[in-house]
Structure formats: C-alpha cells, structure tokens
Amino acid sequence: MQQTDPPLPVADVFNADCPSRMILSHVSSRWGGLVLVALRDGRLRFSELRRRIGGISERMLAQTLQVLEADGLISRRDHGEVPPRVDYCLTEAGEAIAIRYFELAHWIEANLGRLGTQPAQSGG
Amino acid sequence: MQQTDPPLPVADVFNADCPSRMILSHVSSRWGGLVLVALRDGRLRFSELRRRIGGISERMLAQTLQVLEADGLISRRDHGEVPPRVDYCLTEAGEAIAIRYFELAHWIEANLGRLGTQPAQSGG
DNA sequence: GGAAGTACCTACATTTTGGTAAGTGTTCAG
DNA sequence: CTGAACACTTACCAAAATGTAGGTACTTCC
C-alpha cells in the first residue's frame, strides 16, 4: 500500500512566513551567492575564498560560511592541524543552488552593456 | 573590414569594483528578485504587486521598482488617469534575469525539506 | 458627508548589515 | 627574536536597509 503524501503546506516565496524566504535571503545576501559560486571550483580554504572574493572581510566570510553550513549548502572540514587547516565544499543542495546562482550572475556579467548601471539609492 | 572588439574589461562578479556587482545586488536584494518573478505573470499594477508579494511595504515596493527601472529590467507605464493607474512589466533583460532568479527560488521551494532552516544570526 | 482605493512621497525611527581593529595560539621563515 | 600566515572571534562603530505613519489629489461607493 502506498501512503499519500503528508499535507505539508506548499512552499511559497511570496508568502512572508515561508521558510524558503530565509534560505533565499541567505543565498542572495551580499556574500552568500558569491561564496557558493566560488566553491564550484572545488574545495577551498578560508583564506583562498577570502582572496578570491574581492572585497569580503574576514568577519563576513566567517559569518557567511556558518550560515551556509547551517543551511546545509556547504560542508566544513577541519583537518585538525596546527597551524589551522580548514576547507569547505558544496553539498549536493549547495551545488544545485550554486549553479543556478551562477547562471544568474553570469548572465549579468555577459550582458552588462545592455543594462543601466546607476548607483544605488538610499531610502531616507 | 572587421573591427576587433574593443578592449572592454571583462565583467567579473568576484571583482569588488565590477559594475555587475551593483546589478546583482539590486536583483538579489530583499525584494528585487521577488518583484521580477512576480512580473513573469505579466503586466501588474502597483497595488497588485503589493498584494502578491507578502510582507513588502509600499515604500520598499516603490523604491525597488525605481531601482529596477533604472537598471533597465522593468518598464513603467503611466496611463495618466485619475485615480492613478500605473503598471509595470519586464523588459527583455528583465525576463532573462527573472527566469534565472525564478529557477533559483523555485528549486529552494521544491527542496526545502532537504535544507536546514535556521533563523538568521546577526553580526553584533 | 465619510470611508476606501489609487500610486505614490517624505520624515522619522529602528533594525540589520557590514567594516575595522584587535586578540588567540601555533608554526615557520629569516 | 620578529613577522607573517592560518582560521577564526569579539567589541565597537558607521552605514545601509527597512518599517511606520502621515500626507497628496482625485474618484467612487454608500
């Protein structure tokens, strides 16, 4: 006999309370997507990520990595050596998201010329 | 005779100063991507967008629409009627970006169960 | 006349985000 | 012995994002 699927509420990013909003906000945070895309090249160490992602601070990289790990998008491996040696790679879910974020970012890179590039404006 | 392509610097999101970073930040801002995805259903009025996107305030919707318009991703049409009637739709570039953002968001919706959903943490 | 809808804008206050600088403990290069 | 690298953490502060509330000018509904 087959069980019917449990009546989970369907995820919906347009719903303010849907948990998908939280994941989406982490991925599309200032550094989240960039970290994911950087890790598409394979396993990288903290300082390698830091050098690769222009403009990120240590604080933000550490924090972003923690959030992404808690979301199950990357996994952290500590080699237990001294001086410290830690590296990160994408999980399956992380890869799925990274490739999609990459396609978004890459389209923008490739089509920058067709876009207006106004400076951001603040809301005061 | 063929001209060689002008030596434009190649866009690169990993470069902190690349203008693609700005567009990417608008698209992946809290509301930017959601507005774009909402407009995939066709032309929508301000208040329709507001009702569709759960949790957005009038102020943020207005501001997001302006930024996206300046980026060339949506176009605004004012019918010049009274009471006001204004609607928005995606440009070609907007569609290209919207579909990619949608695929990202949709994958997350569809695979929420495989992801950890921790509350965000602040940096102070 | 009063309330609600339309598409916004503005001032103000708060929340969130992010940077800087300093500190930790160890190892290695010079 | 000094300085740098490693992978972080913490405290403090500034900047950016966002919400709330109120206003505008007009129309329609009751």
Image: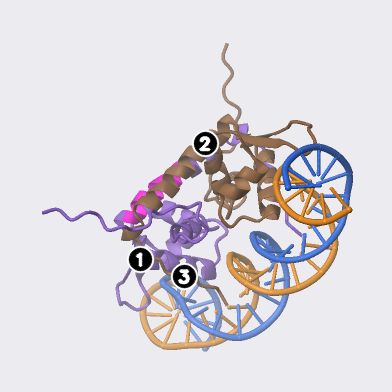
Chain colours: A brown, B purple, C blue, D orange
Is residue A103 inside the magenta stretch? Answer: no
Query: Would residue B41 be seen by someone viewing this image from the given angle?
Result: no
Q: Position of residue D28 (x, y in %)?
A: 37, 75
The reply, left or right, for residue A15 in relation to residue A46 is: left
The reply, left or right, for residue A9 in relation to residue A118 is: right
The segment highlighted magenta reads B93-103
Q: Position of residue B119 (x, y in %)?
A: 71, 48
At 73% from the left and 56% from the top, the residue drawn is: B122
Q: Which residue is mark 2?
A: A41
Query: Would residue A105 be seen by someone viewing this image from the given angle?
Result: yes
Q: Are marks 2 and 1 in contact (CB under 8 Å)?
A: no
Q: Nearer the viewer, residue A74 or D26?
A: A74
Neighbor class of circle 3 (other Cα within 10 Å; few <14, some 14-19, many 20+) is few
- Residue extending farthest to the left is B1
At 59% from the left and 18% from the top, the residue drawn is: A3
Q: Nearer the viewer, residue A67 or D12?
A: D12
The secondary structure type at the circle numbered 2 is helix
Residue A119 numbered mark, or none: 3
Is residue B101 inside the magenta stretch? Answer: yes
For the residue marked with disc 3, what is the amino acid?
A: Pro
- Where, quadrant-wise, is the N terminus of chain A in this rendering? top right
Name the magenta segment's main secondary structure. helix
Chain letter for mark 2: A
Q: Position of residue B6 (x, y in %)?
A: 27, 58
Q: Of marks 2 and 3, which one's residue comes earlier in the chain?
A: 2
Q: Nearer the viewer, mark 2 or mark 3?
A: 2
For the residue marked with disc 1, what is the amino acid?
A: Asp
Q: Which residue is mark 1?
A: B87
The secondary structure type at the circle numbered 1 is strand
